[in-house]
Amino acid sequence: MNKLTSTLVLAALAAAISAASASASNTTNILIRHQMQGCHSWSVNGNAFAPTQRIVVSRATKFTVTDNDVMPHTLVQLSGPKVSFVRPAMNKPGAHASFQLLEKGTYVFRTKAGEDWMKGMVTKGADNVLRLTVIVR
């Protein structure tokens, strides 16, 4: 292998390692938004909005949930190893809840929605129940 080929191989290897590290991020951001059909939904890391989300993460992943809906949401755990929340009651626009998943397992969360901050909001259909399943490997 000549020097140029060796350099290119090393550069490609470094890029692959960098990409793998970036995709194995230990931070997950979830955004709750208002919408006309179903009242609200959420997105994980900027992906599609939906009322039900399922993701796989590594141990020690930190989560931040931001409430940009027109109503407050309280984050609750339905199953899985016990989680300690920081500010699970997101009771004002832009409020954040956070938690970290330290043990392997399957965790299930949902939110309990409160009354609209903005009176007179009209939506179509029944309100979505936001549900998040997280598998920690």
Image (spheres, rainbow, N blue to C red):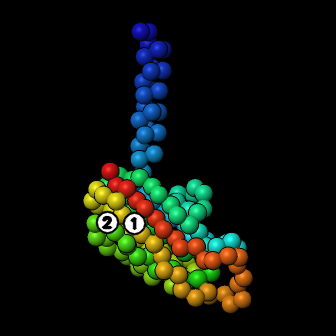
| Res. 63 in view | yes
Numbered disc 1: secondary structure:
strand
Tell me the number on the disc at residue 121.
none
Question: Would you place residue 117 above or below residue 46 in this image?
Answer: below
- Residue at the image point whose x is 47% and y is 27% from the top: 12
User: In terms of sequence position, does the residue under pointer 2 or pointer 1 come before the other?
Assistant: 2
**Residue visible at 37% across and 72% down in the picture:** 78
SS for dot 2: loop
Which quarter shows the N terminus? top left
Residue 23 placement (x, y as % from top left): 45, 45
Give the residue type that dot 2 points to.
Answer: Gly
- Specify few, some or many for label 2: CA neighbours under 10 Å numbering under 14, 14-19, or 20 or more: some
Q: Is residue 99 left or right of residue 124?
A: left
How far is the residue under mark 2 from the one under mark 1? 7 Å
Callouts 2 and 1 close, C-beta under 8 Å: yes
Asked where in the image residue 106 lies, by quadrant, the reply is bottom left
Label 2 sits on residue: 80
* Residue 60 visible in rendering: no
Q: Residues within 10 Å of mark 1 (few under 14, many from 20)?
A: some
Q: Report which quarter residue 47 is drawn in.
A: bottom right
Q: Is residue 37 above or below residue 122?
A: above
Residue at 71% x, 76% y is 124
Q: Mark 1 = which residue? A: 108
Residue at point 47%, 57% (across, down)? 54
Extreme top residue here?
Answer: 1
Q: Amino acid at mark 1?
A: Val
